[in-house]
């Protein structure tokens, strides 16, 4: 198990390095001077001084070297706008984002997986058809539109929930953003679960289990569920990345103080260190979750561990 | 029979969206940008103003109709770019193997490691808002699935008898790839492409909503929703219609993709997800 974990960890390193390089290259070619966009004062001397202050007067490879050196110590640089260390800006916003993503994921799993399961038990039935209509709609809806509609209904019309903001970070504030973010993974889980269960139901080992007289409930519990779990887990893992991307929109819509809204604000204000830092953190988190999912596979399905 | 329903409903919805975009100048009642009249500001939907008007008195119906052009152009063109990149990389990687395959694999893994909307956002940050930037940002960030499928197909197809026969006949490598391999992998590629168009329409809307898409005042469904957010209490109809337009278009593309998958990619029929 440990060697498996170690091997997977080693495989992640080149990807991390490539992402760091990509993020750096992308933003070291930003057209126009950042310093000049910062102040209306077009005095070239001021610009030069600002560039020096921000370390932008070095050649690109020197800047990259410095950047890597700083990264290894967990230093993402200093924000162009707020002059605050990017690391602490991100640290402040990590918890709200994690809260949002895990709440959305919990909603998606809690609704999507049982929905797909029930649908697959009677394929073609009313429940199945309805579940699939819900699923395909959930995948087709624009998240921020759904968010707007929910906001209108539950916050403005009914007044049950706050319309936006983080407040005390309680469930009341979390509910609308989490449901908004969770709808499309919910739809995907319903479809994946249904497909996985349908496929496993026709597998030889299920037929064998039935033919030796095992009750249907036990067949489903012991054979179908466990095997479907691996497929569902893969989908869950893959969705985390997508969710982090989508969280950007949802955070912005609900004024949720997470990494996503930091990223958007930084992009709009061309605050390059903050953009680079937020993207790197999101990608690292995504890779870490995928690693975790891979390890979980090994626990659920021993065949994978030995492969 | 249910499978056909996917295809028909999806096809009709998508065709309708394309028609609306193409016929926008004839369908629209007013100019989507110029015909602003503060006397008509924030009129609710009525016989005169089918979808109501916005805070500048512009006809929402006309803006939704014109907005189809931006959304569909971005959806179709950016997905075409993705498909071409994905097929070119995947097909050549699977066919040639060796170091090129390793390079393509590494690139694909890198793309899969970055959430595509975040990547597109980063590219938009560099290029600045606008239609061309949108096409580039969304066209470069969603080819990894196509690439994987093309590579896997090329790997399994290259040892087929007819491909070996073509080699013996002295076909060049490019010709083999284009005439022998490509037609045999087109099914799944078309399916991914159709579904990809749907997600490109959603991404365009998301980026426009974040203020990084098409510049105002020209309407896109995403930017209309972005404006509508401020007036959700006073004029909820501003949000309803552009959102519905996005929903119906993407729903059409998703159903069409599912339907096509059932026909073109029968192997995956049982494991439809």
Image (cartoon, coloured by chain):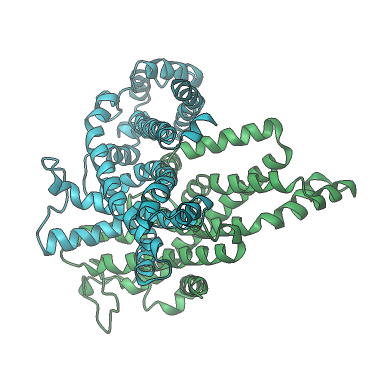
Chain colours: A cyan, B green
Say left or right for B122 vs A83. Answer: right
Q: Is residue A34 above or below residue A123?
A: above
The percent position of residue A136, horizontal first and vertical second, equals 40, 63
The percent position of residue A182, horizontal first and vertical second, equals 30, 51
Outermost residue to the right: B169
Look at the image and tell me whether residue B217 can be seen.
no
| Residue B189 found in image quarter | bottom right
Q: Is residue B222 above or below residue A34?
A: below
Q: Nearer the viewer, residue A57 or B87?
A: B87
The percent position of residue A193, horizontal first and vertical second, equals 40, 54
Say left or right for B14 vs A289. Answer: right
| Residue B186 found in image quarter | bottom right
Q: Is residue B27 above or below residue A282?
A: below
The percent position of residue B230, horizontal first and vertical second, equals 21, 58
Q: Nearer the viewer, residue B56 or A79?
A: A79
Outermost residue to the bottom: B47
Q: Nearer the viewer, residue A151 or B234?
A: A151
Look at the image and tell me whether residue B157 can be seen.
yes
Q: Is residue B42 above or below residue B122?
A: below
Q: Nearer the viewer, residue B1 or A247?
A: B1
Residue at 56% in and 57% down:
B268
């Amino acid at each position: 198990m440990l060697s498996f974990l170690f091997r997977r960890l080693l495989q992640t390193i080149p990807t991390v390095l490539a992402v760091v390089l990509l993020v750096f290259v992308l933003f070291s070619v930003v057209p126009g001077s950042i310093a000049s966009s910062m102040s209306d004062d077009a005095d070239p001397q001021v610009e030069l001084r600002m560039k020096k202050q921000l370390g932008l007067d070095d050649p690109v490879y020197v800047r990259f070297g410095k950047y890597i050196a700083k990264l290894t110590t967990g230093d993402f640089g200093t924000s162009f706008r707020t002059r605050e260390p990017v690391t602490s800006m991100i640290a402040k916003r990590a918890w709200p984002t994690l809260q949002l993503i895990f709440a959305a994921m919990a909603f998606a799993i809690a609704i999507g997986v049982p929905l797909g399961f029930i649908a697959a038990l009677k394929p073609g039935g009313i429940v199945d058809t309805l579940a699939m209509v819900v699923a395909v709609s959930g995948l087709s809806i624009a998240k921020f539109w759904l968010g707007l509609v929910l906001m209108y209904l539950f916050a403005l019309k009914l007044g049950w929930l706050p319309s936006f903001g983080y407040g005390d970070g309680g469930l009341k504030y979390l509910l609308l953003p989490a449901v908004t973010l969770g709808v499309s993974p919910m739809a995907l889980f319903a479809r994946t679960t249904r497909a996985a269960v349908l496929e496993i139901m026709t597998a030889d080992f299920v037929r064998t289990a039935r033919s030796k007289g095992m009750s249907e409930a036990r067949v489903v519990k012991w054979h179908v569920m466990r095997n479907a779990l691996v497929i569902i887990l893969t989908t869950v893992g893959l969705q985390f990345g997508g969710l982090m991307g989508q969280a950007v929109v949802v955070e912005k819509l609900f004024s949720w103080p997470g990494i996503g809204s930091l990223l958007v604000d930084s992009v709009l204000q061309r605050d390059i260190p903050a953009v680079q830092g937020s993207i790197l953190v999101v990608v690292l988190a995504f890779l870490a979750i995928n690693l975790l999912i891979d390890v979980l596979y090994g626990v659920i399905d021993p065949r994978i561990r030995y492969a | 029979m249910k499978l056909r329903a996917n295809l028909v409903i999806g096809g009709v919805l998508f065709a309708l969206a394309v028609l609306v975009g193409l016929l926008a100048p004839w369908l629209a009642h007013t100019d989507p940008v110029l015909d602003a009249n503060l006397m008509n500001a924030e009129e609710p939907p009525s016989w005169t103003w089918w979808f109501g008007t916005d805070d500048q008195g512009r006809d929402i119906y006309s803006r939704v109709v014109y907005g189809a052009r931006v959304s569909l152009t971005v959806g179709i063109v950016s997905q075409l770019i993705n498909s071409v990149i994905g097929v070119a990389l995947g097909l050549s990687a699977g066919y040639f193997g060796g170091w090129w395959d390793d390079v393509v694999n590494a690139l694909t893994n890198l793309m899969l490691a970055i959430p595509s909307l975040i990547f597109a956002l980063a590219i938009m940050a560099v290029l600045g808002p606008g239609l061309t930037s949108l096409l580039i940002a969304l066209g470069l960030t969603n080819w990894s699935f196509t690439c994987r499928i093309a590579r896997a197909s090329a790997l399994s197809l290259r040892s087929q008898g007819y491909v070996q026969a073509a080699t013996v006949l002295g076909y060049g490598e490019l010709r083999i790839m284009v005439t022998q391999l490509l037609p045999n992998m087109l099914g799944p590629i078309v399916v991914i492409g159709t579904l990809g168009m749907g997600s490109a329409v959603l991404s365009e809307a998301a980026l426009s909503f974040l203020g990084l898409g098409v510049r105002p005042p020209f309407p896109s469904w995403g930017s209309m929703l972005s404006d509508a957010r401020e007036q959700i209490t006073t004029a909820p109809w501003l949000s309803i219609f552009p959102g519905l337009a996005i929903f119906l278009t993407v729903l059409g593309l998703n159903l069409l993709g599912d339907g096509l998958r059932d026909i073109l990619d029968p192997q995956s029929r049982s494991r439809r997800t």
